[in-house]
Structure formats: C-alpha cells, structure tokens
Image (tube, rainbow, N blue to C red):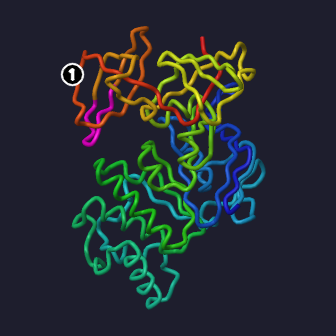
Amino acid sequence: MFLEVSQLRVQYATQAAQARAAVQNVTLGLRAGDIGVLIGPSGCGKTTLLRAVAGLEPVSAGSIRLSGQTVSDATTHLPAEQRRIGMVFQDYALFPHMDVERNLAFGIQHLPSAQRKQRVREVLDLVGLAGSEKRFPHELSGGQQQRVALARALAPSPQLLLLDEPFSNLDVDLRERLAHEVREILKAAGATALFVTHDQLEAFAIGDMIGVMHEGLLHQWDDAYTLYHRPATRFVANFIGHGVFTPATISTVNGQTLVQTPLGDLDDVAECPVPSAFEGGQCDVLLRADDIVHDDDASTKAEILRKSFRGSEFLYTLRLANGQVVMALVPSHHDHKIGEWIGIKAQVDHVVTFQREG
C-alpha cells in the first residue's frame, strides 16, 4: 500500500481525557494511483483525518505511512512541507492578483525558468486549460478556477494529493460533471489522491475506494458497489443510498431459505444468512428503493406519502397498511397522486440483514 493509516487516533488538546477523539482507531490503505474518498456527515472526523495525513494535525496514537516511510505516529511527526503532498481546498486559494501562469508556478520556483514554464504548460494541458496562462482567476468560471487549483497542486509532482470538499462552492450539476473530469485528470497524471466530501454522487463518481465515517470512526472502507450492496454496519446501510429497515423472520422451508417481511415472503434469495444467525430467525432487513417494484396487480398495497420527481423516475415514500414505511423508485410515467394507494412488491437479489433494534 502507498498510503497506510493504522489504528490512527487524533485527539485535540482542548478535549477532555474522557471525551470522544476526533478520529478513533482508523485503519485504511490506498494503493499507488488510486483515489480514496472519505464521506460522512458534518463533524464525523473526515477533514481531521485528511489534515493528519497532510501533517497539519499531530496524532495521539497509531501511525501514518507514505510510500513505506512513517510520517506520523505518537513520537514521529514529519513536517507537512517535507511530505511532498499537494492540497486542493474548498475556496481554491488562488492568488487573485496573479495570472494563471504565476499561480501555477508558485510552488515550483526552485525550477529553472524554462522548466517552470514547461511544467505550467504540461499541467494546463492536463486539466484542459491550455492557453489560459495570462488570464486572472476572476476571468474564469468556478469550474475553471477549480481546475487551475488542481493544476497548481499537481505542478510540483506531489506523491499524494489531498482534496478537501473541492466542489462544495459549485452548483449541483457542475459538481458531478467536474468530479468525473477530475477523476480522468488524476488518472491521466497517475496521481494518488485522498478526497473528502459529504456528497455521495461525488464519492461514487471519483473514488476507487470510499470510506464512510461517523463520530470519528471509519465504519467501512470499500468500493462503491460493496458499500451499497454489502454495508458493514447499520449506519453505512442507512447513510448510503435510499432505503429503510423492516422487521423480518428468516426460516428454512423444504431446504430453502425463506424471509418473511411486511411486503410478503422473499424466497430464492442469494447471500442470505441462515436462520440460526439471529435469535428465533428474527432480524431487520434493508430494503433499498430499487428493491421495491410498482405492480398494480400486487396483493400488497401502500399509500403514497411523498414523491420526488427525478426526471426519468419518481422516488416515492410509501406507507403500508401496518404503518411500515418503504421507498420505491418508479418510472416517471407512473405519476400517482399523494394519498393514492398503489400495488408494490419486493424483488431482492440478496438480503442485507442486521440485528433487530428495539
């Protein structure tokens, strides 16, 4: 692994000894050339973890290794300027009185003039802004400014690039498009990067590996598909995507696993725990919005509580007769009114279960 974080703990001096640390026992690894993303609600510790990797926060326990070298542990702290790390911030931090060329050259002043100009041209080509050397930041769009900030961070050829919510100041449509563009740029540069965001679409668009954090803990470090379909904890299951937990009972009938839910029985499902995994086979099952299918002929009916138009589909929030709430993604030509009852059924390929709460 190129970046290795092991049992990392970061606790601020102002925190009481018994208080929860900002980062607690976090372990993750990132291979050279891969892009990792940290996601979670505000205050979960993702930016603190990023700052510790950058060398801007001392660690209380555990270690951080870069390219085989220990740069942080309880007794070691390699200064940030010696870690060969590039950073891209939320506000871009471009110098408004400097043109693009001088902004990009700021971190490579040690190079001879000809090499410096050549490197500026190279990174501008990389981010698709060739010919913009003499423009000033205020003459650029938000997306262009973000790409200049990325080019400036890449100019010194850092061994690791850190990006702290770099798209938060941009509108939603531009954020997702730019996330795809930045991924292509980083891959073309062969850069290893760690990225912080609170936006799931950004995380899925840019990350090879994604870490979900909550209250200083890293709940899961995995690819996007695994996070969605095989969440390790209830928090990850609840945080990623749209879905609800519903009580269920797992049993074995004629050698086949059967899962009884308020939406009917699920049978012939893959990757389902055996009934003995839970006392009495009773558990909670995660039902994603894409597990619920609108079917007028289905015996199970649900009342539409809310609807959210998403162009090609509606996201319906539905309530069953027993009060259980579920969500469903329905093609947008099925335009039903709030309060209307529609038929639904569950189509689950593999069952995600957790210990029953309450």
Image side of residue 331 versus residue 203, left or right: left
In percent of width and height, residue 21 lies at 65, 33
Q: Residue at x 27, y 39 (%)?
A: 310
Q: Residue furthest top?
A: 322
- 231 inside magenta stretch: no
In percent of width and height, residue 165 lies at 43, 50
- 309 inside magenta stretch: yes
Q: Residue at x 50, y 18 (%)?
A: 264
Up-down: is 58 above or below 191? above
Up-down: is 237 above or below 37? above
Q: Residue at x 52, y 74 (%)?
A: 156
Image side of residue 294 versus residue 85, left or right: left
Q: Quadrant of residue 55?
A: bottom right
Magenta span = 308-316
Q: Secondary structure at mark 1?
A: loop
Prevailing secondary structure class for the magenta stretch in the rendered image:
strand
In percent of width and height, residue 8 lies at 70, 44
In percent of width and height, residue 42 lies at 47, 35
Q: How many marks do you count on the picture?
A: 1
Q: Which residue is mark 1?
A: 337
Q: Quadrant of residue 269?
A: top right
Up-down: is 261 above or below 22? above
The quadrant in which the N terminus is found is bottom right
Q: Amino acid at mark 1?
A: Lys
Callout 1: few (<14), some (14-19), or many (20+) C-alpha neighbours within 10 Å? few
The quadrant in which the C terminus is found is top right
Q: Nearer the viewer, residue 285 or 206?
A: 285
Image side of residue 255 versus residue 193, left or right: right
Q: Residue furthest bottom?
A: 114
Up-down: is 346 above or below 217? above
Q: Nearer the viewer, residue 178 or 333?
A: 333
Q: Nearer the viewer, residue 274 or 34?
A: 274
